[in-house]
Image (cartoon, helix red, strand yellow):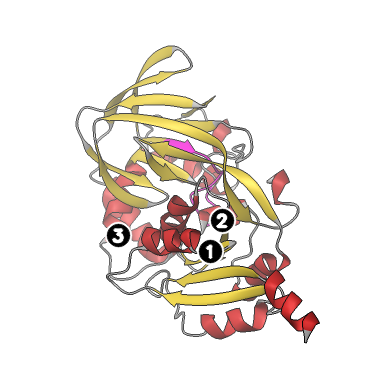
Amino acid sequence: MLNFVLIMKQRRKLYAIINPYSGTHSKDAIPAALERAIDPETWQLKVGVIDRNSHLQQMAAEAIAENYDGVIAVGGDGTVNGVAAALRGSRVALGIVPCGSGNGLARHLQIPVNVEKSLAIINAGNIEDFDYCTVNGRPFFCTCGMGFDAQVAERFSHEGRRGPVTYLKSAFMEYVKFHHEQYRIEINGATMFEKAFVIACANASQYGNNAYIAPKASMRDGLIDVVVIHPFMPIVAPIVGLKLFTRNIDKDINISTYTTSHLKIYRNAPGVMHLDGEPVEMPAELDIKCHPQGIKIFCPADAATEV
């Protein structure tokens, strides 16, 4: 009996937050998968399922107040962002079960897009410290951007169906009517004026679905990879797209890449941009910062190399 009591006292606490609205597949089997995968002698597990009125950050904040050791975000990049936003700067680690359309952060950290395999990583309990970034104080953990990719994110968010086919449809519809914008960028003590197709600020290497916007980006270097895609002729669009998926976009002549811990971007007017793929309305002046080692994440033991 004494041994049992000691084991119970030593158990760590996990809170799994499931977003049933993310991605394209049902999450009905997730609670049972959690029960199978998470060792009850090591972890005390609580499972919550959000509804349309739930607030991810509030649920995660409650886990911090109740001294949980980890909070698992079960969903896509938006779900991960909502949970991680509350956990940043705390001792509570983020677990990721990627069930979304892109799963950019999970893919960067080599977390499998498979429920059982991703849960096995959390159960193993390896936790590392990683960077996160903010735009005017609002956090992102993978990428943020403005220009064409933000317009696509805005259209995609209003589509009834998710998935890569819907995303490609959204991209095509935006491409035929897109107008480039002029930006002023203050970075590393210099001021640049750029007419851009996309400006992406990357903490991690990809948007999701293995589309590598910043192939050399690391979440352990305290730096943001700033990628400026200059206007290009429509005939070269397939080539640029191919390089995006073969980790070679930084070698394209239409691309400029910079690294910095802090930059400011000035647009002509307020408008949409995306944070981890989710469209948000933001002011014309954008203050973007990296916060080194600011969030703890369950990850494979070799994820620190970020290959």
Q: Amino acid at mark 2?
A: Val
- Name the side, left or right, on which 217 lies relative to 65: right
Q: Residue at x 44, y 45 (%)?
A: 140
Q: Chief secondary structure of the magenta span? A: loop
Relative image position of residue 132 (x, y in whole percent): 51, 42
In-front residue for pair 4/188: 4
Q: Are marks 2 and 1 in contact (CB under 8 Å)?
A: yes
Magenta residues, start to end: 200-211
Query: Between disc 3 and disc 1, whose residue precedes?
Result: 1
Q: Amino acid at mark 3?
A: Ser
Whole-number angstrom distance, CA of label 2 to CA of label 1: 7 Å
Q: Among all residues in the image, which is located at the extreme top?
A: 190
Instruction: Locate the N terminus by quadrant.
Output: bottom right
Relative image position of residue 90 (x, y in whole percent): 53, 49
Label 3 sits on residue: 157
- Name the side, left or right, on which 264 lies relative to 203: left
Q: Residue at x 38, y 16 (%)?
A: 192
Label 1 sits on residue: 71
One can see residue 123 in this view:
yes
